[in-house]
Structures are given as C-alpha cells and as structure tokens.
Image (cartoon, rainbow, N blue to C red):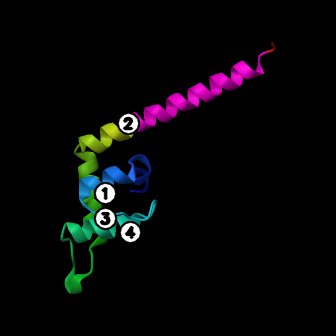
C-alpha cells in the first residue's frame, strides 16, 4: 500500500476516492478516509481498514487506468530527469 501512495500523486487519489486530503505517506489515514467514504464500517462505526485496503488493491490490480497511467508517466519522467542529470554530470566532468 505504501508503494501505491508513493507512485500516485495525492491529488489523483483524493479525486478518485472522493476523500478529503490525507497526511502524505500515512497509509492508515488514507485507508481510514477510503473506508469511511465507501462505508466499510465494523460494529460500532469503526472503519474496517482491511476492507478499505482491499478496495484500493483491487482497483490497482484491476487497472485503475487513470492512476496507473499517471504513475507510469510520472515514473518515466523521473527516470528521464535522472538520465538528464547523469548526462549533465558526465558533460561537466569532461575536460574543456
């Protein structure tokens, strides 16, 4: 779950799950909000974290296309920036 939160921008998650903002990187806070919005409650109104996690994992595994596509493009952009930085370092290391 932590990896999904790392890969997907918070704005996308908030929009997709129709939740308010959550603490960045806080899996429990995210799942509490998803569980509340989706009505995954146990007796006494306690949020069922496991059910909320299953929802998110199901969406991820079944191809939540907007998030997956965004995560892939985001990851590719990060790789591209990394390559550009390495190229710049190599060029700077060359004798003039």
> Dividing the picture into quarters, in which one does residue 87 lie?
top right
Is label 1 in contact with label 3 (beta carbons under 8 Å)? yes
Using the numbered discs, state the Cα–Cα distance from disc 3 to disc 4 in whole angstroms: 11 Å
Using the numbered discs, state the Cα–Cα distance from disc 1 to disc 3 in whole angstroms: 6 Å
Is 79 one of the magenta-colored residues?
A: yes
Please tell me the numbered disc located at residue 14: 1
Circle 3 residue: 20
**Is 84 left, or right, of 72 in this rendering?**
right
Is 16 one of the magenta-colored residues?
A: no
Return the residue found at the far bottom. Answer: 44
Q: Which residues are magenta?
A: 73-94
Q: Residues within 10 Å of mark 1 (few under 14, many from 20)?
A: some
Using the numbered discs, state the Cα–Cα distance from disc 3 to disc 2 in whole angstroms: 24 Å
The numbered mark, 4 or 1, whose residue comes first in the sequence reads 1
Circle 2 residue: 72
Is label 3 in contact with label 2 (beta carbons under 8 Å)? no
Using the numbered discs, state the Cα–Cα distance from disc 4 to disc 1 in whole angstroms: 12 Å
Whole-percent x, y for residue 22 in the image:
38, 64
């Amino acid at each position: 779950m932590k990896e999904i939160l790392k890969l997907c921008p918070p704005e996308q998650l908030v929009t997709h799950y129709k939740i308010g903002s959550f603490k960045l990187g806080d899996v429990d806070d995210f799942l509490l909000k998803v569980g509340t919005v989706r009505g995954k409650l146990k007796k006494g109104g306690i949020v069922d974290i496991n059910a909320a996690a299953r929802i998110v994992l199901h969406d991820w595994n079944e191809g939540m296309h907007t998030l997956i596509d965004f995560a892939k493009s985001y990851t590719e952009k990060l790789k591209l920036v990394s390559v550009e930085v390495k190229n710049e370092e190599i060029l700077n290391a060359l004798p003039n």
